[in-house]
Amino acid sequence: MQGVELIQHYFPGLPAEQRDRFAALGELYAHWNERVNLISRKDFEHLYERHILHSLGIAKVHAFAPGSRIVDVGTGGGFPGIPLAILFPDSRFHCIDGIGKKIAAVQGVIDHLGLPNATAEQVRSQDHKARYDFIVSRAVTTLPEFIKATRHLVPRTGQVLGRHGGPMRSGLLYLKGGDLADELRPLRYSIRITELRDVFREEFFTTKKVVEVGL
């Protein structure tokens, strides 16, 4: 499966407006990728699997409640923020990145989609002062370094995340791959890991994970 059919396979029953917005992403990213290097040309043919569906792996772990405020740090081309904003129209997503050209492209995608619950801003996380309920991101750096740069963006809850515990009240949802043992060892936060190979059958997800950190 390719394109929007892949999204509909894992997220059946989407309203028409959401299906149309997911379907539009292919053409929109083709347009912007010619102007700004958002996705490598080699990887672009896998846009829906490796970028859009990967972003939506977070949705298989956490359903954002209406009114939730989420910041996508180091958004790059708008991942995972834009796909999540399409899927959760009653939550608000703010996509930030330090590279102006990428943020211009992200804002262009948001504008073309008419996505009212998503915004974009050129700012480094260290310099950003707003507060959110959740941070989302895709493997910007190691977890200790990422948490150090973003910890101030969400309230302190001290939440304990059990393997079968309830959803986070606030914290970090981080898409990461590979062996995380060395990254997790110095952290003193409650952590829960979901293997995306248990969620999506495509080979790309064999080593991919969603890491929840109860900050």
Image: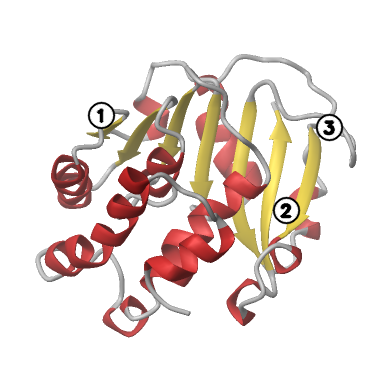
Against 151, residue 177 (above or below) is below
Q: Nearer the viewer, mark 3 or mark 2?
A: 3
From the viewer's side, name the closer residue of 208 and 57: 57
- Label 1 amino acid? Pro
Q: Which mark is residue 116?
A: 1
Q: Is residue 166 left or right of residue 169?
A: right
Which quadrant of the structure image shows residue 126? top left
Q: Is residue 194 visible?
A: yes
Sequence-first tag of 1 and 2: 1
Q: Residue 212: where, in percent of width, then height?
A: 70, 40
Count residues near mark 1 (Cα–Cα under 10 Å), then give few for <14, some for 14-19, many for 20+. Answer: some
Determine which residue is flagged by label 3.
161
Determine which residue is flagged by label 2.
183
Label 3 close to label 1 by CB (< 8 Å) = no
Q: Can residue 141 be seen in this view?
A: no
Count residues near mark 2 (Cα–Cα under 10 Å), then give few for <14, some for 14-19, many for 20+. Answer: few
Sequence-first tag of 3 and 2: 3
Q: In this view, does 52 lie to the left or right of 122?
A: right
Q: Residue 72: where, in percent of width, then height?
A: 43, 38
Against 130, residue 2 (above or below) is below
Q: What element carries label 3?
A: loop
Q: Residue 85: where, in percent of width, then height?
A: 39, 38
- Label 3 amino acid? Leu
The Cα–Cα distance between marks 1 and 2, rounded to whole angstroms, is 36 Å
Q: Which residue is drawn at 37% across and 79% down?
A: 43
Which quadrant of the structure image shows residue 61? top right
Q: Which residue is drawn at 68% across and 59% down?
A: 209
